[in-house]
Image (tube, rainbow, N blue to C red):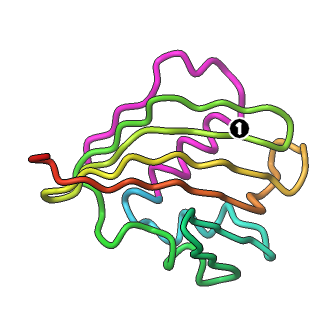
Amino acid sequence: MKIELPTDCGNAPRITIVSDFVTAWAGRDLARMSERLSDDFVWRIAGGEEHAGADAAASSAPPAAADRLVLASVITHGRLAACDGHYESGSSTVEFSHVFRFASTVKTARIAEVRSYLIERSVNS
């Protein structure tokens, strides 16, 4: 997978965590995703889907690993973080925005919740 990350990420530890997590998500690296999730993790996808617990990573990852991931921005503050970008897979592109809530403000805290907004479009559109 070709990966493009923001160049102005600075040195905030959570920016690296979010970037690594989204890279694992786009690549369907479920083991790497699961390492970052709290025991009571919930993933909410706009439109009504909600996945919780051990199967949340598999249920919320793209159906196939992306060919290309572009992470446009990552923002963090306290227990919260957000990122946006898009991934390309086959003949489609999915624009995404993820909002993260960590279990605590500790640098090593696990992710407790993700809210995702996804828009899929054909590459030819």
Report helix, strand or loop for mark 1.
Answer: helix
Q: What's the amino acid at mark 1? A: Arg
Q: Quadrant of residue 90?
A: bottom left
Q: Quadrant of residue 68?
A: top left
Q: Nearer the viewer, residue 18 or 119?
A: 119
Looking at the image, residue 34 lies above or below residue 9: below
Q: Residue at x 63, y 76 (%)?
A: 50
Apparent side of residue 85 relative to residue 51 in the rendered image (left or right)? left
Looking at the image, residue 72 lies above or below residue 92: above
Task: Inspect the magenta stretch and tell me whether residue 90 lies in it.
Answer: no
Q: Magenta segment, which residues?
A: 1-24
Q: Residue at x 66, y 48 (%)?
A: 99
Looking at the image, residue 55 lies above or below residue 97: below
Report x, y in % for residue 2: 26, 42
Looking at the image, residue 55 lies above or below residue 122: below
Q: Residue at x 70, y 81 (%)?
A: 53
Task: State the residue position of label 1.
Answer: 14
Residue sticking out furthest to the left: 124
Report x, y in % for residue 66: 28, 56
Q: Residue at x 54, y 63 (%)?
A: 32
Q: Nearer the viewer, residue 32 or 69?
A: 69
